[in-house]
């Protein structure tokens, strides 16, 4: 496995958010993580993404055991978290959003942003996702589903091995949802793992190799591909 979570526990005042959750993520696997609001799905993924610290349990990355992760350590390990609230800038183009803070530079000590090189580096990422827009396209011109593609392209630019999608389709129409499910399938073909949190069960049925179900912070059960309906 790329990642193994073992006996992860987390409480908030008056709430046992996670009660000893364990799971494994293998290369190229698409895991559907489901459960009603408050089941603990997002909390579990925030622990994996380094946003939240668990009270107990272990996180094993490539055979190395950790008590908790920082956001930087999670990113370095190739874990990318695409949140419901996208962290993008409408006033910049696609390429600038993907390489924000990591821009290629030119002009020696002046360190000017090399816009041409940035767009050149972005093009194969968009092609890999089957995106129908260019690196130079202003973000303000894109639909919500296309903006999510930009977030996923940003993850690929950081050599992500595991992409966590937290309810990415919750505000998408069905036509846009189909595009995102195609992107998940493309990631799987490239050997990139995906954890897909969704309340739309027909999407889970279509996309997932395995389903993990949480209820009130506890593991309610798992289903393999053939068992999902």
Image: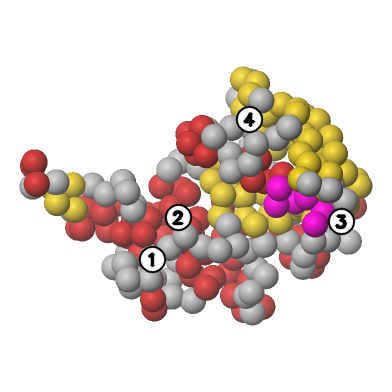
Residue lying at the far front in this picture: please name it.
13
Q: CA distance from mark 4 to mark 3?
A: 32 Å
Q: Is residue 88 magenta?
A: no
| Quarter-of-image position of residue 162 | top right
Q: Earlier in the sequence, mark 1 or mark 4?
A: 4
Side of 81 where 65 appears, left or right: right
Residue 8 visible in rendering: yes
Q: CA distance from mark 3 to mark 2?
A: 29 Å
| Residue under pointer 4 | 68
Q: Secondary structure at mark 4?
A: loop
Q: Residue at x 65, y 36 (%)?
A: 53
Q: Residues within 10 Å of mark 3 (few under 14, many from 20)?
A: some
Q: Secondary structure at mark 1?
A: loop
| Residue under pointer 1 | 89
Pick the front one: 14 or 66: 14
Q: Name the front one of labels 4 and 2.
A: 4
Q: Earlier in the sequence, mark 4 or mark 2?
A: 4
| Residue under pointer 2 | 153
Range shown magenta: 38-43
Q: Assign the N terminus to one quadrant of the image.
A: top right
Q: Earlier in the sequence, mark 3 or mark 1?
A: 1
Evaluate if marks 1 and 4 touch, with contact meaning CB atoms under 8 Å apart: no
Q: Earlier in the sequence, mark 1 or mark 2?
A: 1
């Amino acid at each position: 496995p790329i990642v193994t979570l073992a006996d992860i526990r987390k409480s908030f005042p008056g709430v046992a958010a996670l009660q000893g959750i364990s799971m494994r993520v293998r290369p190229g696997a698409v895991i559907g993580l489901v459960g009603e609001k408050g089941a603990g799905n997002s909390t579990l993924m925030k622990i994996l993404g380094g946003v939240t610290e668990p009270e107990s349990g272990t996180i094993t990355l490539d055979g190395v055991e950790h008590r908790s992760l920082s956001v930087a350590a999670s990113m370095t390990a190739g874990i990318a978290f695409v949140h419901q609230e996208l962290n993008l800038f409408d006033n910049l183009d696609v390429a600038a959003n993907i390489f924000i803070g990591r821009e290629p530079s030119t002009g020696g000590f002046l360190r000017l942003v090399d816009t041409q090189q940035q767009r050149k580096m972005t093009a194969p990422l968009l092609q890999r996702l089957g995106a129908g827009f260019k690196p130079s396209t202003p973000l303000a011109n894109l639909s919500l589903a296309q903006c999510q593609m930009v977030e996923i392209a940003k993850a690929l630019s950081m050599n992500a091995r595991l992409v966590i999608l937290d309810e990415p389709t919750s505000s998408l129409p069905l036509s846009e949802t189909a595009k995102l499910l195609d992107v998940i399938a493309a990631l799987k073909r490239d050997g990139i793992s995906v954890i897909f949190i969704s309340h739309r069960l027909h999407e889970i049925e279509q996309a997932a190799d395995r389903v993990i179900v949480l209820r009130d912070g506890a593991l309610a059960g798992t289903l393999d591909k053939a068992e999902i309906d």
